[in-house]
Amino acid sequence: MDRLLDEPAVQRLSSLYGREVVRVQARAELDLLRRALEAEPGVDLQAEIRDLPERLSRSLVDRLGSSLRRVLNATGIFLHTNLGRSPLPRAVTDLLPELTDAYCDLEYDLASGRRGRRSTRASGLLAAASGAAAGLVVNNNAAAVFLVLSALARGRDVIISRGELVEIGGSFRIPDILETAGARLVEVGTTNRTRVADYERAIGPETALLLKVHPSNYRISGFVEEATAAQLARLGRQRGVPLLVDEGSGLLRPHRAPQLRDHASFQELVAQGCDLVCGSGDKLLGGPQSGLLVGRADLVERCARHPLYRVLRPDRVVFAALEAVLGLHATGERLPLDRMWPESDRPDGRRLESVAAALGAEIVQADAFLGGGAAPEEPIPGRALALPDDDGLLRRLRVGEPPVVGYLREGRLILDLRTVDPIDDTTLIAAVRAARR
Ligand SMILES: *Cc1c(COP(=O)(O)O)cnc(C)c1O
């Protein structure tokens, strides 16, 4: 037992899980080994002893779960929700230590020495970027929708098209969110066709809100019709009913990519007269998990003053990261998202060729995707690396250090560098070589 606990690998486990927890598990592993020896005296004792630290580590992970790990995402899916959605730009993470290992003026007005508002700067930058009068930040976009419905529509009617009663990602269902917020759902139109007149007919004295939701992760095509945000904003203004658009992706301004051409940004929606627009901070914006809400000052203020805001407000790490990301957007800096269109920036594809040469990989055509519910059917054509999936290379890369996640296509392993930070190229090469050995 003492020798086992003194092994460097086991000491690392002790600092991670605590010495006592490791000791209890180690005792269990030793008991198992003793019993195995009694049942089968011929086992190779030295090999079993060599394996003990590894077996101990596996059983601890099984029981207690492993810690978060840095993963190289070579799937070509930029917003992979299972892999943490958007990575923060390095320029942003470089700034974080200074704001997180000390006190900061999170809710303090340094000029007057009085209490300040938590979200002033991030909200201001958000409003400025989208051309709205006011902004507010909460923990995620589901929280933003929930807060607006609770603050503006509790006990009253919310009108939404039957074509937009969607489920998005892990169990975010629009009808359920409405019900939980205490609002009454008034469905109009049909799954494939809804017109402005359908909304108009449904407006009554109990109507609190018109709601338009970007369907994000699915498309219906063929015989379809929907009321545009601009049409609904006009109708809402005529009838004195505000319109909330759940844009979803946090695209603040139009993006040059053809895959995003049809995706209306915050800026465009605000310009079209939408009263409130909300989206995620960790999708196309490339920020931390957060919910972004912009719009009319009086409506945003009602949300900020609602008791639920206190429950849904983010912490200072989120504000620090979000402010920095919004700052990069404002100065037109290259963001992780822009890696998805590398051909226009590096017509020679030198990066891909040098990694391919280092690995003896073939360069093949491959589609990448934005993921995270943005432009789900719009492939981003380009090139990726292909390797034979010998001896389950895909799986061995996944359990290596650092883990590398690729995908199989026609029996070959595809590694798409568009979702890999170029700074990680040497690590990726080393990981593939190690997994092949
Ligand atoms: C992603 C998405 C959500 C959920 O956003 P979270 O930030 O994950 O809470 C809600 N609505 C739409 C339209 C989305 O695309």
Image (cartoon, rainbow, N blue to C red):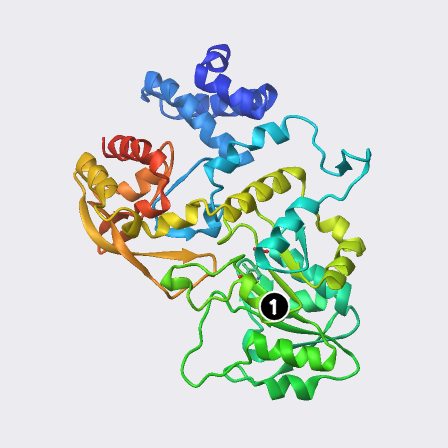
Residue 17, image x and y in percent? 57, 26
In the image, is residue 106 above or below residue 10?
below
Q: Nearer the viewer, residue 206 or 230?
A: 230
Q: Give the residue at mark 1.
A: 245
In the image, is residue 96 above or below residue 352?
above
Picture quarter with the C terminus: top left
Determine the image quadrant of residue 147.
bottom right
254 left or right of 411 in image: right
Q: Judge: label 1 CB < 8 Å from ligand 1.
A: no
| Label 1 SS | strand
Looking at the image, can residue 38 be seen? no
Please state the quadrant of the image where ligand 1 appears.
bottom right
Residue at image coords 64%, 58%: 293
Residue 89, image x and y in percent? 47, 40
Amino acid bearing label 1: Val
246 left or right of 379 in image: right
Residue 282, image x and y in percent? 53, 50
4 left or right of 299 in image: left
Looking at the image, can residue 254 be seen? yes
Residue 157, image x and y in percent? 74, 76
Q: Nearer the viewer, residue 14 or 335?
A: 335
Q: How many residues crowd around disc 1 within 10 Å: few (fewer than 14), some, or many (20 or more)?
A: many
Q: Nearer the viewer, residue 36 or 199?
A: 199
Determine the image quadrant of residue 109.
top right
Residue at image coords 44%, 69%: 262
Count of numbered badges drawn on the protein: 1
